[in-house]
Image (spheres, rainbow, N blue to C red):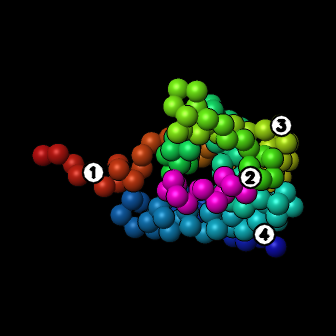
């Protein structure tokens, strides 16, 4: 069922790929919304099987793939409000998936690190999510897949919101 929904989303986007000009194409958010919704729907069973929320997985991903961070730095890295992630951090810590320890340089600050158990849960979850993504990406020819992933990586590495708000000078 999810693959059918995802396939429909990809077909919707592909229908505009070649013939649509920038003046008559759908907005980027409209094109990406259906695909994103289908991907998120496909991820829910994987997250549930690993007893994680999307925010929990997001935190584990940041800690597994980045340096030890303060809570404030983590919130900034995942673009979340500091107060929003506290219950997520509490849950992950209670389950032994992350640890918080005082910063030796400032004992008021807590440093976050993923535990070995957290790495195992992260690895299983990421494997399941990536399998679903591969099914979606397989709908694209290899060259389109590489181009899509390269463009997506580029756009996700910049502050798109600030760029979109910026007014041209002159």
Q: Earlier in the sequence, mark 3 or mark 4?
A: 4
Instruction: Where is residue 102? Give x, y as percent.
Output: 61, 35
- How many neighbours does mark 3 have within 10 angstroms: few (below 14), some (14-19), or many (20 or more)? few
Q: Which residue is mark 3?
A: 116
Q: Which residue is mark 4?
A: 2
- How many neighbours does mark 4 have within 10 angstroms: few (below 14), some (14-19), or many (20 or more)? some
Residue drawn where x is 35% and y is 48% of the image: 163
Q: Earlier in the sequence, mark 4 or mark 1?
A: 4
Q: Which residue is mark 1?
A: 166
Which of the image's four quarters has the N terminus? bottom right
Task: Report the mark closest to the observer, 2 or 4.
Answer: 2
- Vertical placement of 111 versus 125: above or below? above
Q: Earlier in the sequence, mark 1 or mark 2?
A: 2
Instruction: Where is residue 29? Give x, y as percent.
Output: 48, 64
Report the disc number at residue 92.
Answer: 2
Q: Is residue 113 left or right of residue 170?
A: right
Q: Disc 3, disc 4: CB below 8 Å? A: no
- Vertical placement of 96 versus 38: above or below? above
Secondary element at tag 1 = loop
Residue 51 at least partly seen: yes
Q: Is residue 74 left or right of residue 27?
A: right
Q: Disc 1, disc 2: CB below 8 Å? A: no
Query: Which of the two residues, 135 or 111, is positioned nearer the viewer here?
Result: 111
Secondary element at tag 3 = helix
Q: Which residues are magenta?
A: 80-92
Q: Is residue 65 left or right of residue 85?
A: right
């Amino acid at each position: 069922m999810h693959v059918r929904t995802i396939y429909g989303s990809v077909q919707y986007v592909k229908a505009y790929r070649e013939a649509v000009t920038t003046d008559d194409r759908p907005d980027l958010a409209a094109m990406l919304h259906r695909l994103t919704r289908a991907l998120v729907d496909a991820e829910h069973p994987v997250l549930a099987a690993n007893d994680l929320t999307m925010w929990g997985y997001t935190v584990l991903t940041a800690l597994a793939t980045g340096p030890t961070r303060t809570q404030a730095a983590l919130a900034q890295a995942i673009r979340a409000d500091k107060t929003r992630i506290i219950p997520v951090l509490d849950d992950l810590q209670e389950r032994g998936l992350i640890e918080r320890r005082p910063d030796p340089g400032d004992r008021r600050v807590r440093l976050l690190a993923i535990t070995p158990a957290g790495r195992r849960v992260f690895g299983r979850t990421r494997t399941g999510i990536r399998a679903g993504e591969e099914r979606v990406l397989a709908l694209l020819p290899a060259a389109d897949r590489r181009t899509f992933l390269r463009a997506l990586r580029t756009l996700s590495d910049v502050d798109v919101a600030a760029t979109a708000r910026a007014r041209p000078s002159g």
